[in-house]
Amino acid sequence: MTENKHTTHDAADDIRNADIKIYVNGDILHRDDAKVSVYDSGFMLGDGMWEGMRLYHGKWAFFDEHMDRFFSSCKAISLEVGMNRAGILDALSKTADANDMHHDVHCRLMLTRGTKVKPFQHPSLSQSGPTLVIIMEHSKPVESLLSQGIRLATVPQVRGLPMAQDAKYNSHSKLNCVIASLQADQAGADEALMLDPHGFVNTTNACNFFIVRKGEVWTSTGDYCMNGVTRQKVIDLCRSNGIPVFEKNFSLYEAYGADEAFLTGTFGAQTPVGEIDGKRIGTGSHEMTMRIRALYKDLVAENTASV
């Protein structure tokens, strides 16, 4: 592992995170005391859904869009949330208040099918109701993510067909992406660039992937990638600001020859890509990426402004 290695989720150190309080099924506990059972279906099987969200000026950015995805995913796997959107927002607010958190906060909201009566697979063995955990941290991306960019390596692990495990789920079952991340790490890269089942460029192990070619912004068709909230916001911003944007199949040939490439995700917003498989991408100016970052920053400010 090289000294300048980083990932799209590298955050600046913040000593306040040593004493954060975590929400566990209605209780708010110091991080050292926040625990779930070893019989929990999330621990045992990865049976659960999660959302990553950011808090700006006391308001969760794009809350409705995140809840659309969260509740749709839970419904698709017959996972009862146990509360409505207002209940989720109340739990988020209580956790933020307990931590005196207002701005530049990242949250991981996790829901599992709950504690099992026996250590086996069948969902009917989870009989005590869901487990809801909320972890919030003071969190700002490190500056090197912008100044250096991310180094990607194409890996053999692919984003699979929906009938295997639909990538649109923000599922606790992340082994596919963990394997891809390990393959990238062993190749000396920061993150993995994953192809779809047909060999077209798809996404990374953690983020959605875009390229810029001759003033056009390209991303995958969306058939085999997570339906990222930030991904959709970038597509919408391009359309509303006269930037040609296409959801299409493209190969590594087009990615290697791109003028720019960037990743999108709730944590890092838009992160420039410096190289793919050892090949430098463009000149390093990231002009379009920075334009989209500015548009996105304004959109977040508008969405989280006080009424």
Image (cartoon, helix red, strand yellow):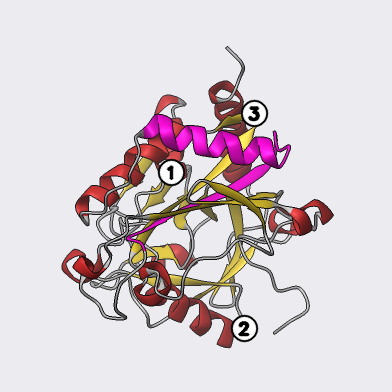
Q: In front here: 123 or 282?
A: 123
Of labels 2 and 3, earlier in sequence is 3
Query: Looking at the figure, which quarter contains the C terminus?
Result: top right
User: Tag 1 or tag 3, which sits nearer the N-term?
Assistant: 3
In front: 141, or 72? Answer: 72
Residue type, numbered disc 1: Glu
Count of picture labels: 3
Give the numbered dot on residue 188. 2
- Residue 7 part of the magenta-drawn span: no
Residue 186 at x, y = what percent? 57, 88
Q: Which residue is mark 1?
A: 216
Report the Cα–Cα distance between label 3 and label 1: 35 Å
Q: Check if mark 3's residue and mark 1's residue have beta carbons within 8 Å.
A: no
Which residue is depicted at the point 41% across and 29% down? 86
Q: Residue furthest bottom?
A: 186
Residue lying farthest to the top in this orientation: 307
Whether residue 160 is situated above or below residue 29 in the rendered picture: below
Is residue 100 highlighted in magenta?
yes
The residue at 30%/73% (across/down) is 117
Give yes or no for contact between labels 1 and 2 (Cβ–Cβ under 8 Å): no
Cα–Cα gap, marks 2 and 3: 39 Å
Left or right: where 240 falls relative to 58: left
Q: Residue at x 71, y 52 (%)?
A: 20
Q: Which residues are magenta?
A: 85-114
Mark on residue 58?
A: 3
Inspect the image, locate mark 2, and give the three-letter code of the amino acid beneath it. Gly
Q: Mark 1: which secondary structure?
A: strand
Q: Residue furthest right?
A: 15
Report crowding for label 2: few under 14, some 14 to 19, many 20 or more residues within 10 A (C-alpha): some
Circle 2 or circle 3, nearest the eye: 3
Q: Nearer the viewer, mark 3 or mark 1?
A: 3
